[in-house]
Image: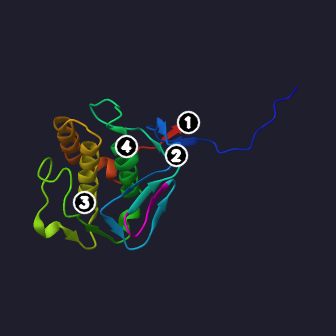
């Protein structure tokens, strides 16, 4: 019996790093206000700041020298990973404003926001990344993570997160 050929590409190209997949929608009202709605894969951000994930979103969960605990998952998988994905795919090149609420769980506890940065029009990539990191800290505190650990996570993403929010991704090929 002869072997039948299957038409296909000569190589599969892939990236590493996904180990969790959402099974329900997840949402949060955030401080980012894009000038038009952003939709990428299972990630959505409306003009009024409604951020939501649809079922099927994939994530590698919390990164760095940490463990994937229940008080970390909503902030990491439900907010931080998808926002960094938007930044990596340059979806945030849509004009985005940042509108700070009057009070936040992490303000003065983990981070400080200058009064002139309470409203940022047409925020830069780095300003959006900083807001994403601050909102992560807020979620961690709301989910009862110890302040010390939330501070450690926040400082870690501020110092080491830039490469994860940048367009560069290593692509593998097989065979």
Quarter of the image for residue 35 reads: bottom left
Of the pair 86 and 21, the residue shown nearer to us: 21
Image quarter where the N terminus lies is: top right
Q: Nearer the viewer, mark 3 or mark 2?
A: 2
**For this view, does 126 lie left or right of residue 6?**
left
User: Magenta region: which residues?
Assistant: 43-49
Labels 2 and 1 touching (C-beta < 8 A)? no
Residue at point 54% right, 46% down?
56
Labels 4 and 3 touching (C-beta < 8 A)? no
> Dot 2 lies on which element?
loop
> Dot 1 lies on which element?
strand
At which x and y percent is residue 92? 37, 64
At which x and y percent is residue 40? 49, 58
Query: Which badge, 3 or 2, comes first in the chain's sequence?
Result: 2
Residue designated by label 2: 24
Q: Is residue 44 magenta?
A: yes
Of the pair 56 and 127, the residue shown nearer to us: 56
Query: Which badge, 1 or 3, comes first in the chain's sequence?
Result: 3
Labels 1 and 4 touching (C-beta < 8 A)? no
Query: Which badge, 4 or 2, comes first in the chain's sequence?
Result: 2
Residue designated by label 1: 174
Alpha carbon separation for disc pair 4 and 2: 12 Å
Alpha carbon separation for disc pair 3 and 2: 30 Å
Q: Nearer the viewer, mark 1 or mark 3?
A: 3
Alpha carbon separation for disc pair 1 and 3: 35 Å
> Dot 4 lies on which element?
helix
Alpha carbon separation for disc pair 2 and 1: 33 Å
Residue designated by label 4: 74
């Amino acid at each position: 019996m002869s072997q039948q050929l299957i038409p296909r590409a000569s190589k599969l190209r892939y990236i590493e790093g996904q180990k969790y997949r959402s099974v329900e929608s997840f949402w949060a009202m955030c401080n980012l206000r894009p000038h038009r709605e952003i939709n990428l894969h299972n990630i959505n951000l409306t003009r009024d700041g409604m951020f939501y994930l649809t079922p099927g979103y994939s994530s590698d969960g919390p990164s760095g020298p940490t463990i994937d605990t229940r008080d970390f998952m909503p902030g990491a998988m439900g907010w931080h990973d998808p926002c960094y994905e938007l930044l990596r795919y340059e979806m945030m090149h849509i004009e985005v404003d940042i509108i700070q609420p009057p009070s936040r769980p992490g303000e003065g506890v983990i981070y400080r926001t200058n009064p002139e940065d309470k409203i940022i029009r047409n925020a830069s990539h780095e300003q959006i990344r900083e807001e994403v990191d601050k909102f992560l800290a807020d979620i961690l505190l709301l989910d009862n993570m110890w302040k010390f650990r939330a501070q450690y996570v926040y400082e870690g993403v501020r110092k080491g997160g830039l490469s994860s929010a940048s367009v560069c991704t290593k692509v593998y090929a097989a065979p």
